[in-house]
Structures are given as C-alpha cells and as structure tokens.
Amino acid sequence: GRLSWFGRISQHFARKSHRRSDTESNRMDEFDIEENNRSTHAARNFQAVPDETLVPRVQIRNLVKRYNNKKQVSPAVNNLSLDLYESQITCLLGHNGAGKTTTISVLTGLFPPTSGDCTIYGDSITNNLAHARRSMGICPQHNVLFENLTVREHLILFHRIKGVNPTQQNITDCAVDVGLGSYIDISAGALSGGNKRKLCLAIALCGDPTFLLLDEPTSGMDPYSRRATWEMLRKKRAGRVTLLTTHFMDEAELLADRIAVMKNGGLQCCGSALFLKERFGLGYNLALVIDEGGDTG
C-alpha cells in the first residue's frame, strides 16, 4: 500500500492505507497522534514562523471550554494556544470530537470560554465580544438559511446586518464569486446541498470581514466546486485572517498555509504541509539507481 500522510501521525511511523476508496483515503476519520507527542520533544512538532514580519492578528491563549456534562472526561477545548496571521489560511484538522467546531463556536461567541481568551485584531472575546464580532465572517458547520428567501435576498439582508448598503453589482459579484451567479434569484430551499454551502460561504464574505471562520465550508460540494472554492479563498486571503476546519487532507494541503492538528481538545502539532510531512516521515520516498554502464539509447 502507499504511504498516506492523512493517516495516523506519530513521531516514528505512518500507518499505510489498506484497500481504501478515493473518498475514504481523503478523510481524517483515522487521524491520530500518539500521546507521547506532548513530551519533551513536543516543541519539534511546531514549525517556527518563517517570516518574522508576520504579525499575529488573532491570538488564542490557554483557551478551555468544558461543558456541564458529568460524562465528559476532558474539556472539549483543552488549553489551546494558537496564533493566526493576516493573509494566511490556517486549517484546523482532527477527527470528530477533537474540538474543532467547539473552538470555532467559542471564538465566535456562541459559547463562552471556561477560561483563557482570544484577541481578534486587539479585541478580547471575553471583554469586548461585540466589537470583536464586527471583524468576523462566519460559515457555520450546518447551513443557517431562510428557505423562502432567494440568494439575492440573503446577500442583501446580510450585507445590511453588517452595516453595508450594497449595490446590485456588489450582490452580483458576491454570488458570482462563489459560483451562484446563475442561481441568484432562486430560493434557498430549492438549492442543492452543495449550493446551500456556497450561499453560506457567500454570506460569510458579506461586508468584507477581516477574520473569516469557515467550519467545513466545502462539505457537500462536488469536486469541481470544491476546487473553485479553494481558488476563490486563496485569492481572497490577502488582508484577512482565515481559519477553517476540514476532514479532507487534500483540501488542507492545497489550501492552507498552516495546518494545526487537534486531538482531545488540544493542539498536537502545527506547520505547513511540507513541515508536517518531513517531521513525521510521511509521503513518498523515491530511490534511483543509475547504471552508468547501461544502454541509455
């Protein structure tokens, strides 16, 4: 079998994939990291920021979220600290229950943190959440749409909620950016699942936010739409912080500048796709043997 870097990451080996379909081989369902990653060698799992001119615009510090659930052994988010940089896309990866969506929920103010804090362009989510939210554009994990409103009406509504009075050209451009130009006067209830995700993404982009939070934004999209969405997000990353979650490793590798891996609510490693492959010995190894005396004709 081929080595697959989306599999179990540990300090010493990568699990080979066996008889997986293309869909299965791109998912994070078996993503895991050995507990000893949090050893004295843990610092090796985090890539230093290569560009010293980068300034973290979003700073998560010692974030903890514990629900009032007696069955919960550990916090949903466990002492998470992470810097997010402007003009970069940071991807949160981890299996179900790793804490990705809870992290997004706390950052957006849906749930208060149990302890710790996050500053968003200088505004604390614990002390100044209302002001911090002005910077945000949010695409939640599940579609939040008005079934009877058209794509156009959604975009007008959410622009105005964000204090922007859009022109018709603004609305058209927003729909075209996500691939909904030909559906602009179709009601949300008549859209396919993939197109509903596109509309949620367009809503997140309303008002040109400086902090974009996308929870599995391409879920339900066909392969062509996913790649078009990646291209659009990369074009729009300049001047803003983008944080997204995904289960698809091809998405993380092709889209993210930095990948942060979560397990049991904690951060296990963080860096570029190349850094993580080199750090954990994942990928392909090609050995060439040259026979200088052989016939090259």
Image (cartoon, helix red, strand yellow):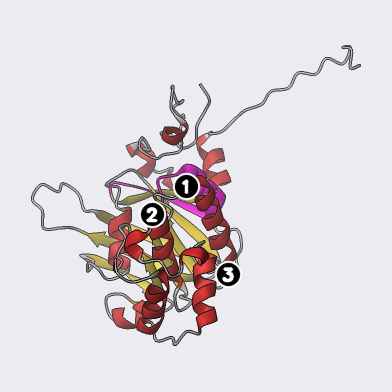
Query: What residue would you read off at disc 2?
Result: 192
Distance from disc 3 to disc 1, alpha carbons, whole Å, reads 26 Å
**Amino acid identity at mark 3:** Ala
Q: How many marks?
A: 3
Between the C-alphas of marks 3 and 2, the distance is 30 Å
The kind of residue tagged 1 is Asp
Q: Which residues are magenta?
A: 246-264
Q: Quadrant of residue 283?
A: top right
Which residue corresponds to mark 1?
222
Q: Secondary structure at mark 2?
A: loop
Q: Residue furthest left?
A: 70
The amino acid beneath tag 2 is Ser
Residue at the image point whose x is 39% and y is 40% from the top: 28
Q: Is residue 257 magenta?
A: yes
137 within the magenta span: no
Q: Is residue 59 visible?
A: yes
In front: label 3 or label 2: 2
Q: Which residue is mark 3?
A: 238
